[in-house]
Amino acid sequence: MVSIGSPCNCLKEYTENQYDKYDIEKHCDSNVFGDDAFARLYAFVDADIEALFQLFSRRLYRDSCKWEDGHCLKDLRLLAIDMAKVFIIDNTPRVFRLHVNNGIPIKSWYWDCRDHALRNLLPFLEKLVDVDDVRPIIAARFWKRVKSAPPSAAHIRRKFLLRNSF
């Protein structure tokens, strides 16, 4: 088991710089993480951000994802809610393949205490609250040329084999 200590100091500094009421220090000494330390730490941070902003009603993590060609895909259908009312925020756009127009890309955060990507995204997220369908708004801002999900490598291989079969 690996105890994550120094990143908590960065998290504390990060959150103190951005969120006055965000108290993460109490968790630093008591949390011990295993092999999936970063996934659990991100989940921990996400949960606290959710409590702070009260914007997110549900979360899915890596264990809820589908895998295709060695890549993680987030399937929003697991939430069993109207696709017009849900979005994904992730630093890896390929996870949006199943729901491109529900995907909001965000800059990767690797212990950079000066990172403001999520805070900078909040005004856009607040605009999504009262719309009938988030997809055209997300598509217009992030995916101007994307009409549908990019094909998977397996789909491209199948198409190639069908065209070139004798």
Image (cartoon, grey):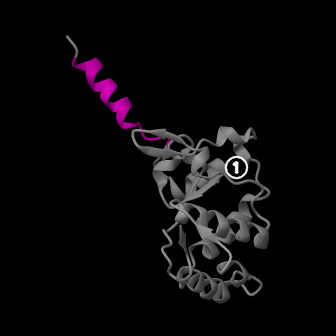
Instruction: Judge whether residue 17 is colored magenta.
Output: no
Residue found 78% across the figure and 56% down from its top: 57
Q: Position of residue 135 (x, y in %)?
A: 64, 48
Residue found 33% across the figure and 24% down from its top: 158
Give the residue at mark 1: 86
Q: Position of residue 45 (x, y in %)?
A: 65, 70
| Amino acid type, label 1 | Val
Residue found 61% across the figure and 45% down from its top: 64
- 33 with respect to 93 (left or right): right
Residue 79 drawn above or below residue 8? above
* Residue 148 in view: no
Q: Nearer the viewer, residue 69 or 102?
A: 69
Quadrant housing the C terminus: top left
Considering every residue shown, the one lying at the far front of the view is 1
Q: Secondary structure under badge 1?
A: loop
In terms of image quadrants, where is residue 13?
Answer: bottom right
Q: Nearer the viewer, residue 160 or 66?
A: 66
Q: Nearer the viewer, residue 35 or 118?
A: 35
Count every numbered label the image shows and give the total: 1
- 60 with respect to 158 (left or right): right
Look at the magenta stretch and give its main secondary structure: helix
Instruction: Judge whether residue 161 is colored magenta.
Output: yes
The magenta stretch is 147-164
The crowd level at tag 1 (other Cα within 10 Å; few <14, some 14-19, many 20+) is many
Q: Position of residue 148 (x, y in %)?
A: 50, 39
Q: Position of residue 140 (x, y in %)?
A: 56, 54
